[in-house]
Amino acid sequence: MRWKTSAILLTAALALAACNASETLESVDVSKVQDKDDHPLSPAILADIRARGMDRNSPIMIRILKEEGVLEIWKARRDNRFEKLKEYQICAWSGRLGPKVKEGDRQAPEGFYSLSPYHLNPRSSYYLAINTGFPNRFDAANRRTGSNLMIHGACSSSGCYSMTDAQILEIYAFARDAFKGGQQTIQLQALPFRMTAENMARHRLSEHNEFWKMLKVGYDQFEITKRPPEVNVCEKKYVFNQQPEGNAKFNPTGACPPMSTPPALASAMKSYELAYAKDYGKAMKKYDGKIWYDPTEAERKALVAKQRKANDLAYAPTGSALKAGKLLSIEEFEKAAMAKAEAAKAAEEARQAAAVQPSAAQAASVPVPTPNPVKSETAAAPQPPKKSFWNIFGSGRQQAAEPAPQPAAPASAAQASPQSRQQDQTPQAVSDVAVPQPNPTTTPENLQTAAKKPFWKFWVTQ
């Protein structure tokens, strides 16, 4: 009899689970939801919350793992330790691994952020939105800029973490209920990947490695305590669960005050780090001589291009960085990087050339000027030699006439006459320069007339 009762209860539980699974918000037609900012969590999720020893309005924490393309909801149990309750596949995030540095770089933020009820936006153009809180104190201290970086719907991103509308409807409800329960701030941990020994070894050669090592301290402490770490900033760096001495305070850009780690946490961290070091050593043997290629946004999008069919034009999933990335030897990576740099340089040069040179149609529309016959004949006629500068101050004494030679046009700058090069050279002493002969047609009367010319007349070209 007892086994029959157990079988009946098991069958009922399975049926209930199957029923509740189909009632998640993922299957809701969001176009028909009228109360999106106050829409309740599904009965299946509420039942799961109760089964895990949680309250509907207990605190939550949001964790984003960029490379895995995952957003996790962690919720506090009645013992105040957090447990992962739900996991969502991020539909779209832009840029590559690494923090956001400046406005317009298309990077999605990485770091530890505090969200308040003020960060919820029920009237977002992207269905619903939760502001990430970027820039925080760390970002501001390091002069990182950007604005309106959200977790939102619509599956389209430019520096945001974008979900489907059905997903953000549920995520928004988790945050709303936690704030209704009295939670003052929700911690958002936006991380590049799960910061395990293997992943840290795989990404050890990244330019962001030092930044990630700093984030890893907070990641590790959460893994140990299962409680969101207390976050502060000093010396432009994150510090986690540090207790300042006396009345000292943390200044994001100033020196860190004297501080210490709680003894129980310090002891747990020591054991954790010993195990981590062992795992990291094993991972380094696996990745020795190899480097992970972090894919571009375009390479990720190429994997999911078919998903855009029959969807709105704004719908733009970006795919998985794990699937689009690859492990290369260091030599292969350097060759690939060099080839990409050369391709980018060639593309930029082509772009600049196209911007400078007119098109064939533009060139054909520009009239070509014809030479002036009068000016051409004048230019072809031989010109008398110009007077030297020092002849202005000569006595005007007539010397023996001598026909001026007609030099051939020089083939190069080296064959040019001294007079033609005179503008580019320092004047020599008068005694070293041949004095040009006067024009034989000049008469004494004309010389007297020339000598009486005003000073400025000497500068008129003959």
Image (tube, grey):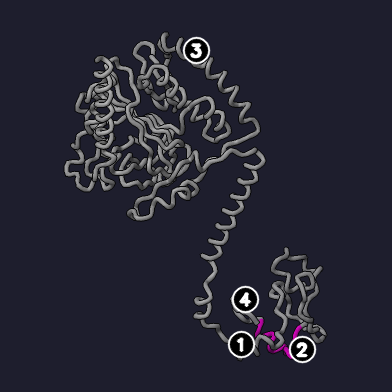
Instruction: Describe the element under mark 4 as helix, strand or loop.
Output: helix
Specify the quadrant of the image occupied by residue 372: bottom right
Q: Are marks 1 and 3 in contact (CB under 8 Å)?
A: no
Residue 162 image offset from top left, x and y in percent: 35, 42
**Mark whose residue sits in front, 3 or 4:** 3
> What's under tag 3, amino acid-wise?
Ser
Q: Residue at x 25, y 22 (%)?
A: 9
The residue where tag 4 is placed is 459
- Ranked by sequence position, the earlier of labels 4 and 1 is 1
Q: Which mark is residue 375?
A: 1
Image quadrant occupied by the N terminus: top left
Q: Residue at x 49, y 38 (%)?
A: 322
Label 2 to label 1, Cα distance in Å?
28 Å
The residue where tag 2 is placed is 440
Above-or-below relation of 380 to 239: below
**Mark whose residue sits in front, 4 or 1:** 1
Q: Residue at x 24, y 23 (%)?
A: 8
Q: Which mark is residue 271?
A: 3
Q: Which stretch is magenta?
A: 438-450
